[in-house]
Amino acid sequence: MKKKATSKSIPPARPFIYKNRTLLCDSVPLSSLAEQYGTPLYVYSATQISERFQLFQQAFQDRPHTVCYAVKANPSLAILRLLGRQGAGFDIVSGGELERVRRAHKPALKKVVFSGVGKQAWEIDAALKAGILQFNIESEQELGLVAARAQALKVRARFALRVNPDVFAETHPYISTGLSEHKFGIDIKIARAIYRRAAKSKWLEPYGVSVHIGSQIRKVDPFASALERVTSLVAELRRDGHNIRTIDAGGGLGIDYSDAPFDPAHQVERYTAALAKGLANETAHLLLEPGRFLVAQAGALLTRVVVIKKNGSKTFVITDAAMNDLIRPALYHAHHEIIPVRQSSSKGTITADVVGPVCESGDFFARDRAIAQVRPGDLVAILDAGAYGMSLSSNYNSRPRPAEVLVEGKKVSLARRRETMRDQLAPEVL
Ligand SMILES: *Cc1c(COP(=O)(O)O)cnc(C)c1O
């Protein structure tokens, strides 16, 4: 963390700050990025991503651990490389994400954990050949498939059962995963029997236990409860003669999307304390799978106002970004702060819906929101868009996906160029 904040005030949670009324990412004015790369544009601070990763590294330095960044939060090769070079492992959920890790930082393949409820034979084969750390297994059928593929390839597969601890994590229903009503994990009550059966196969190595109870979780108690259950299962498994080496605590630590003060160091402290409570005296190698917490606040979606339209009493600020670029508001009714790139001296505000050009009434970034007075042509930044922004983007309405840039201090690097129509049409056949 920067040591600059001498007062007791909490340092800004985001790398986007005003200097002389103009919004910067690290030291780079967003207006110059818009000029050079066009809009809509995803802008990420590499500085903040590294800082967040190092917060985790330091918080867990007293125990053997690996921070396996959850690739699905933001799978940009540049971000994977940035984290891989600092020692991160990766949590993947598909063969595609495995390939991304290989391209970004090959040595990290041995620190990959493979999650997901529907792994297919080709994905399992690729992961076995890559020598990943462990498969997080979501059903006994899947364990059978992994055993069969391991036998075919003549290698041993290290696995952890992803147990479902039946713990409620207060978050949006679409991203809560730790209850028995959810499709995720294996009922913790039957896990022991499955390890016992699996241990009979010479192609399977019982290696760990994993859990992941959901995403954007703000209270830390559910993490402690889930891990307590995992820890007592591990003790039983050891008594049953299994050499359990890893405990995977999953991801899910949330951020604050509002403009209230937010202290990431304090959040990581609370989280670490909750996990320590759940782990008690357990000393297994700890795996962590943060996604959102590492990248969400490092990123903004930079967009230009196309037109301002009034319909009756409503005002619509229509931007060149849309739900295909950032679907979180439409999908989860998520809140994102929206701020102007050029701060005006007048401080006037308007109450408006900020929307995109896509043909859906669900295409909005904010509704009835008081925002700074803006005019057509002005730039605005949609904050906290670094996680589940670009990774959930699509070509809906045949819109090209945005470009992405990574900023580090004064340095800017293009992480992904803007899509062209040629890119979009390439796979199609006439
Ligand atoms: C999505 C996911 C994560 C990351 O969740 P965040 O809320 O982004 O930290 C970690 N592990 C698994 C298994 C996931 O599905």
Image (spheres, grey):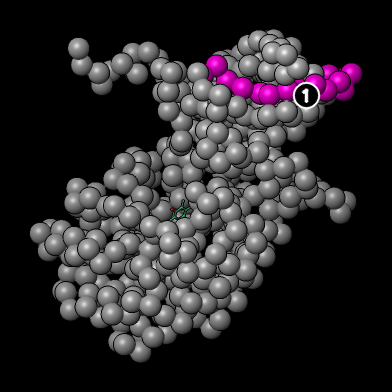
Q: Which residue is mark 1?
A: 351
Q: How many marks?
A: 1
- Tell me if 149 is positioned left or right of 419 in this view: left
Rendered image quadrant of residue 111: bottom left
Label 1 residue SS: strand
Rendered image quadrant of residue 160: bottom left
Q: Is residue 85 visible?
A: no
In percent of the image, x 29 and y 64: which residue is there?
139
**Residue that extends furthest to the front in the rendered view of this protein:** 312
In percent of the image, x 36 and y 50: which residue is there?
93
Q: Is residue 134 magenta?
A: no
Give the quarter of the figure containing the C terminus: top left
Mark 1 C-beta closer than 8 Å to ligand 1: no
Rendered image quadrant of residue 100: top left
Q: Position of residue 228 (x, y in %)?
A: 52, 77
- Tell me if 299 is positioned left or right of 418 in this view: right
Q: Position of residue 344 (x, y in %)?
A: 83, 19
Residue type beneath disc 1: Thr
Nearer the observer, 163 or 209: 163
Q: Is residue 371 above or below residue 107?
A: above
Q: Is residue 353 magenta?
A: yes
* Label 1 environment density (alpha carbons within 10 Å; few <14, some 14–19, many ≥20): some
In percent of the image, x 39 and y 74: which residue is there?
188
Q: Position of residue 299 (x, y in %)?
A: 60, 36
Segment tinted magenta in the rendering: 339-358
In percent of the image, x 42 and y 23: which residue is there?
396
Q: Is residue 161 above or below residue 323?
A: below
- Tell me if 7 is positioned left or right of 121 in this view: right
Q: Is residue 323 visible?
A: yes
**Residue that extends furthest to the bottom in the rendered view of this protein:** 239
Nearer the observer, 385 or 101: 385
